Amino acid sequence: MFRLPVCPHCGTVYRYKDTKEAIRKKENVCYHCKKKFLAKRFPYIFVGALIPLVLCIVINIVILSRMENLQLLPLFGVTLVFLLIIYIIIPFFTKFKKTEDKEKK
Ligand SMILES: [Zn+2]
């Protein structure tokens, strides 16, 4: 599950950098087989984001329960780190889908 996407036509594995580029462009042409595919983050990213999100909430609660005075900075810091983690792992939860062939007879 936790791996970089492959071309739906020829199975070429995309590197992290190429995947980010593919997500940005949405519609892509495989550099290997020259066929079109779409980069889709959803709904797969929810699975990947759920674990860091739950961890983030748990850590925030732990920090909050140990605080004598309410300080928002540590909470913001933790949340920011987890948002960064989610951002970094997005390519691992992206799937490439074949473009719908609308030229079928
Ligand atoms: Zn391909």
Image (tube, grey):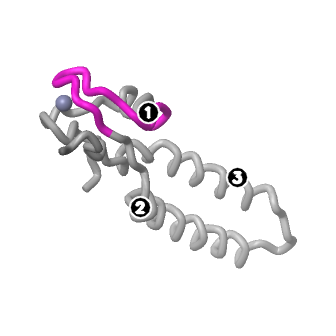
- Which quarter of the rendered image does ligand 1 occupy? top left
Front residue (pair 52, 11): 11
Report the span colored magenta: 23-37
Inspect the image, locate mark 1, and give the three-letter code of the amino acid beneath it: Lys
Front residue (pair 103, 36): 103
Query: Looking at the image, which residue is at 41% across and 61% down?
Result: 43
Q: Which residue is mark 2?
A: 43
The CA span between labels 3 and 2 is 27 Å
Q: Is residue 14 above or below residue 91?
A: above
Q: Within the magenta stretch, is there residue 33?
A: yes
The CA span between labels 1 and 3 is 25 Å
Q: Is residue 46 above or below residue 99?
A: below
Query: Looking at the image, which residue is at 25% across and 27% down?
Result: 30
Q: Earlier in the sequence, mark 1 or mark 3?
A: 1
Say which quarter of the image contains residue 62. bottom right
Left of 77 or right of it: where is 30?
left
Inspect the image, locate mark 3, and give the three-letter code of the amino acid beneath it: Gly
The percent coordinates of residue 13 (x first, y second) are 21, 33
Query: Looking at the image, which residue is at 57% across and 64% down?
Result: 56
Left of 29 or right of it: where is 47?
right
Query: Looking at the image, which residue is at 51% across and 51% down?
Result: 86
Q: Which residue is mark 1?
A: 20
Determine crowd level at label 1: few under 14, some 14-19, many 20+ residues with C-alpha closer than 10 A: some
Q: Which residue is mark 3?
A: 77
Q: Which mark lies nearer to you, 1 or 3?
A: 1
What secondary structure is found at the residue carrying circle 3? helix
